[in-house]
Image (cartoon, helix red, strand yellow):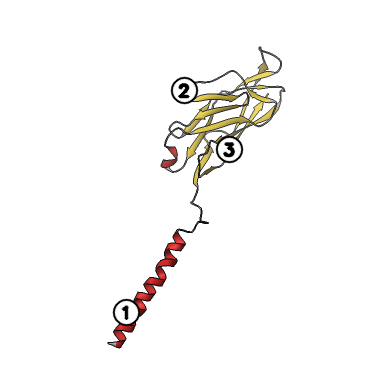
């Protein structure tokens, strides 16, 4: 009988001691939730070439690229609730986006960037660059407009103007 009581006391004591530590570990304030990760990848070619022509609207050159810039977005399905946008922006200050290509999925942010909606996991931007120089390579960086608790990589297109 003594052995049963001692064993029962030890078991109840062990359960009582383990409970506070388990709840403290799961509800610790310094443990941050895991961020949702979006993965941006270039669909098609990261490098494109096109011939520039003298701009009719002012000094400089305009270059229309035959293939649009296309970025694929991968991530958890919950990350795609609501509208998801990507920002396409010229890296160099001498690079600007020419004539507006605005539509249902594309809106101009400023002369050097566009916000493009992700549709079916892809963001597509038909592109005409306005530049100051010929025979140069320009970079267009694509970033996701992130929500709280998200992170994503950037992708860069290299566009050669000849």
Total of numbered circles in the picture? 3
Would you name the residue on which mark 3 appears? 155
Work out whether mark 2 precedes mark 1 in sequence or the reverse, and give the earlier one. Answer: 1
Q: Which residue is depicted at the point 41% across and 72% down?
A: 17
Q: Look at the image and tell me in which quarter the N terminus lies.
A: bottom left
Q: The residue tagged with tag 1: helix, strand or loop? A: helix
Question: Looking at the image, is 24 positioned above or below residue 37?
Answer: below
Would you name the residue on which mark 1 appears? 8
Work out whether mark 3 precedes mark 2 in sequence or the reverse, and give the earlier one. Answer: 2
Question: Looking at the image, is 162 positioned above or below residue 34?
Answer: above
Outermost residue, top direction? 56
Q: The residue tagged with tag 3: helix, strand or loop? A: strand
Q: Which residue is depicted at the point 39% across and 74% down?
A: 14
Q: Is residue 57 left or right of residue 114?
A: right
Q: Which residue is depicted at the point 45% across and 32% down?
A: 83
Which is more foreground, mark 3 or mark 1?
1
Which is more foreground, mark 3 or mark 2?
2
The location of residue 47, given as percent across then percent down, is: 61, 32
């Amino acid at each position: 009988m003594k052995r049963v009581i001692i064993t029962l006391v030890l078991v109840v004591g062990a359960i009582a001691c383990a409970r506070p530590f388990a709840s403290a570990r799961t509800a610790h304030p310094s443990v941050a939730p895991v961020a949702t990760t979006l993965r941006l990848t270039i669909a098609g070619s990261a490098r494109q070439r096109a011939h520039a022509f003298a701009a009719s609207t002012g000094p400089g050159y305009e270059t229309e690229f035959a293939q649009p810039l296309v970025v694929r977005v991968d991530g958890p399905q919950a990350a795609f609730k609501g509208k998801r946008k990507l920002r396409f922006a010229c890296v160099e200050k001498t690079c600007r986006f020419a004539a507006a290509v605005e539509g249902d999925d594309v809106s101009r942010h400023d002369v050097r960037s566009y916000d493009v909606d992700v549709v079916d996991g892809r963001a597509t931007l038909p592109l005409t660059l306005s530049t100051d120089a010929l025979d140069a390579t320009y970079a267009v960086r694509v970033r996701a407009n992130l929500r709280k608790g998200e992170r994503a990589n950037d992708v860069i297109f290299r566009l050669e103007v000849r």
